[in-house]
Image (spheres, rainbow, N blue to C red):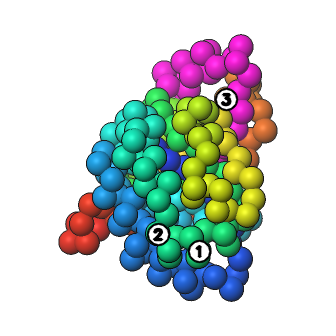
Amino acid sequence: MSLSGLGMVAIWHDLLPEVRTEFHEWHNREHMPERVGIPGFLRGRRYAVIGSGPEYFNLYEANSIETLAGQDYLQRLNAPTPWTQRVVPSFRHVSRALCRVVFTQGVGSGGVMLTLRFAVPDAAAEALTNALCTRFLPPLPYRNGVSGVHLGIADRAASSVETAEKRARADTTLVPSWVALIEGNGVPEVDAACAELLPALMATGAEQVEQSRYRLEFTRLKTPWSAG
């Protein structure tokens, strides 16, 4: 399906292995309910890597980029709970982008997500945005087994704000500039869609493309009885 709103938080990270069990409990029972409880946050999803790439991918959907840059979210980031303060220092190789959604289309949520992180020179940004949104992305949701295709462009200022939660991480947090997501039934389906998209990305100016695949592990809406 289309994303629930026009703002998204995309986070990739590894994790110290000795904290994995506690991380899952914290993320399921405190952190994700806390995040989707913020006004304007609509849904959270966590994915685990298939093959190579950062171990986890977390996706939060929100009303708009203004929601993500607003005081409600910022206040939460600056007041981490004791459990958050205990778990977050175990994150490694974090990449996090607060994005304005510029394209989203689909028929449902898929069990597998392919993520693309890439950079675009400023001079090529407008042309690439237009090409992706009008020519290259619209056909992909109609491919067999593809349930949704989405494109976000990071708000670098909002993504780079220093907060108490960010300072608690052991590593520097990178900010991917552009994020494309392809979700579907399985790895062959999202790979086939990606194989169609990648040449167009490279031909129209995308650089430093990083690709990973993930399986859905957990999802949460506002309340536990509407967890899908």
**Residue lying at 66% horizontally and 69% vertically, measured from the top left:** 89
Range shown magenta: 114-136
**Residue lying at 74% horizontally and 53% vertically, measured from the top left:** 172
Q: Which residue is mark 1?
A: 87
**Residue 4, above or below 212:** above
Instruction: Report the amino acid beneath label 3.
Output: Ala
Instruction: Report the amino acid beneath label 2.
Output: Thr
Residue 107 pos. (x, y %): 33, 48
Give the distance between the C-alpha atoms of the residues marked 3 and 2, in whole angstroms.
44 Å
Give the distance between the C-alpha atoms of the residues marked 3 and 1, in whole angstroms.
40 Å
What kind of secondary structure does the magenta stretch mostly adopt? helix
Is residue 84 shown in magenta?
no
Q: Is 118 on the left-hand or right-hand side of 24?
A: right
Image quarter where the C terminus lies is bottom left
Confirm or deny contact between disc 1 and disc 2 (CB under 8 A): no
Confirm or deny contact between disc 3 and disc 2 (CB under 8 A): no
**Residue lying at 53% horizontally and 41% vertically, measured from the top left:** 98
Q: Residues within 10 Å of mark 1 (few under 14, many from 20)?
A: some
Q: How many marks?
A: 3
Residue 96 pos. (x, y %): 61, 49
Q: Which residue is mark 3?
A: 200
Q: Residues within 10 Å of mark 2 (few under 14, many from 20)?
A: few
Instruction: Report the amino acid beneath label 1.
Output: Val
Check residue 81 in the rendering and tell me which mark sits there, or answer none.
2
